[in-house]
Image: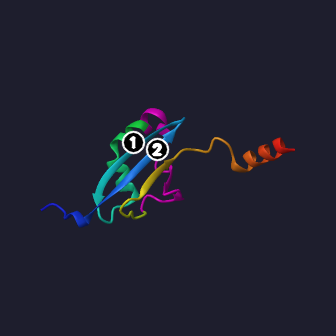
Amino acid sequence: MPASPEARLTVEVVFAWDGRSWAQHVELEAGADVDAALGAAREVRAAIAAHAPQLLQDDAALAVHGRSAGRAQRLREGDRVEIVGPLKVDPKEARRRRAAADD
């Protein structure tokens, strides 16, 4: 018997790389976690495999609505799961450069 609509949730999985972004809405069982969302987001995983395969590793940085998240974090209706790439510039170094440019 299929799950009732109340027992399901829809979340968005997003990935951005080099000025491009991919997003996919996936429907999951209520109580699903970040790992389940990543597994269901085939289009986003294909984009990652093509552009940044290193992010498919288990230690890739993940976030839910911009806050760091682990793969076991439970999701709620409307959550946005983000696959986060490495920083291109250390934030402290970027601030130093901006401060030096202002002098």
- Assign a secondary structure to mark 2: strand
Q: Are marks 2 and 1 in contact (CB under 8 Å)?
A: yes
**Would you call the spot at circle 2 few (<14 residues within 10 Å), some (14-19), or many (20 or more)?**
some
Packing grade of label 1 (10 A; few <14, some 14-19, many >=20) is many
Q: Amino acid at mark 1?
A: Val
Q: Residue at x 42, y 62 (%)?
A: 72
Quarter assignment of residue 34: bottom left
**Image quarter (top left, top right, bottom left or bottom right) of the N terminus:** bottom left
Q: Residue at x 58, y 44 (%)?
A: 86
Sequence-wise, the earlier of marks 2 and 1 is 2
61 vs 29, nearest the viewer: 29
User: Looking at the picture, does residue 38 appear above or below residue 2?
Assistant: above
Q: Is residue 54 left or right of residue 30?
A: right
Q: Label 1: state its secondary structure.
A: helix
Residue 65 among magenta residues? yes
Q: Which mark is residue 44?
A: 1
Q: Which residue is mark 2?
A: 15
The C terminus: image quadrant: top right
Q: Nearer the viewer, residue 26 or 68?
A: 26
- The magenta span reads 48-72
Residue 101 image point, x, y percent? 82, 41
Residue 33 occupies which quadrant of the picture? bottom left
Amino acid carrying label 2: it is Phe
Question: Is residue 15 a member of the stretch shown in magenta?
Answer: no
- Horizontal side, residue 26 vs residue 99: left or right: left
The percent position of residue 99, horizontal first and vertical second, equals 81, 47
The reply, left or right, for residue 91 in relation to residue 84 is right
Residue 53: x and y, percent? 47, 37
Q: Which one is in front, 14 or 42?
A: 14
Q: Residue 68: which disc? A: none
**Structural distance between the alpha carbons of marks 2 and 1:** 7 Å
